[in-house]
Amino acid sequence: MPELPEVETIVRALRLGGRDGPSITGWTLVGARILWGRTLAEPSEIEFLQHIPDQVVQDVGRRGKFIFLRLSRDYLIFHLRMSGDLRVERDVNEHGDYLELSSHDRFVITFNNGYRLVFCDARKFGRVWLVDNPETIFASLGPEPLDSNLTPRDLYRRLQQHHRQLKPLLLDQSFLAGLGNIYSDEVLHLARLHPLQPAHTLSEDDAATLLSAIQKVLEEGIHNNGASIDWVYRGGNFQNNFRVYQRTGKPCVNCGSYIERITVGQRGTHYCPHCQSLR
DNA sequence: CCTGAAACCTGTCTGC
DNA sequence: TGCAGACAGGTTTCAG
């Protein structure tokens, strides 16, 4: 599921309230329940459970596709991978009974106010870390695409350094942090660039076009609370604005040519053969 | 450096 | 209806 806009939507809901749940900012942790052991990447379960109690959620933030809770002493970091989601709900009812979890819930943090934060993840790829320095986790990430300090010239220079095809490069989190398969296809279509175009062949103007497409598509995604497809993720509307993703055989919104689907780096890739020509 | 394949997992959909 | 196979929003690791 979750690419930058979905993750950002979840982060804002945790920080400020929303998505059917209250804000967790300022809440105090009391414990945790780990239902699928591999979800906890670091540290050991024993150590984790020792560190959690009494820490207060100071803030909730995002770096790339990672979600982090800045706690009193540590950072609690989530990666949702393919099918993860987070929700905030009551842990106990008015009689003091524990409320049932669903079969896909993998990891639960409980607060001292009777609420819990639940990490639900059907495919079990998602991971959680508790670390004192978040940079140990974020070290290999590239720049934030919506950071106003990222200039067209910066992107141009970075593109010049790679001979890879554009699509796999955009998916590489060390090149740029936050794009996934949906938004990469949407970005390349808006920028009218072919997914297989070698990165270093882009002109400085191409790089500027690409950066503005990246920012426009991501902002559009955030504005729509992300994209909900199939049974994964909830509440987003961006799926109604797709230009190419999952529109194989349908007319291009620019020129009416039929959208094609190819496989690039093991990922389904959708593009318009007319608007996005290989140069 | 780059590409492709496989692995980690479960759920859904399609076609026979 | 049942079942095999393909496919899915991500990332890591390994072979060539």
Image (cartoon, coloured by chain):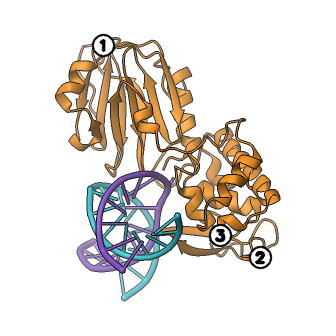
Chain colours: A orange, B cyan, C purple
**Helix or strand or loop: what does disc 3 sit on?**
loop
Marks 2,1: beta carbons within 8 A: no
Q: Which mark is residue A274?
A: 2
Count residues near mark 1 (Cα–Cα under 10 Å), then give few for <14, some for 14-19, many for 20+.
few
How far is mark 3 from mark 2, CA to CA?
A: 18 Å
Count residues near mark 3 (Cα–Cα under 10 Å), then give few for <14, some for 14-19, many for 20+.
some
Check disc 1 and give the amino acid type.
Glu
To the question of a shared chain for discs 1 and 3, the answer is yes
Q: Where residue C8 sits: x, y (%)?
A: 47, 61
Q: Do we see residue A102 in this rendering?
A: no
Instruction: Say if A237 sits above or below A108 in the image.
Output: below
Check disc 2 and give the amino acid type.
His
Q: Report the residue at 62% width, 46% height from top.
A: A237
To the question of a shared chain for discs 3 and 2, the answer is yes
For marks 1 and 3, the one nearer the N-term is: 1
Q: Which mark is residue A198?
A: 3
Q: How many marks?
A: 3
How far is mark 1 from mark 3, CA to CA?
A: 60 Å
| Quarter that holds the C terminus of chain A | bottom right
Q: Nearer the viewer, mark 3 or mark 2?
A: 3
To the question of a shared chain for discs 2 and 1, the answer is yes
Instruction: Say if A276 sits above or below A54 in the image.
Output: below
- Host chain of mark 1: A
**Helix or strand or loop: what does disc 1 sit on?**
loop
**Helix or strand or loop: what does disc 2 sit on?**
loop
Count residues near mark 2 (Cα–Cα under 10 Å), then give few for <14, some for 14-19, many for 20+.
some
- Host chain of mark 2: A
Instruction: Say if A182 sits above or below A23 in the image.
Output: below
Q: Where residue A146 sits: x, y (%)?
A: 67, 39
For marks 3 and 2, the one nearer the N-term is: 3
Q: Which mark is residue A94?
A: 1
Query: Is residue A183 shown left or right of residue A111?
Result: right
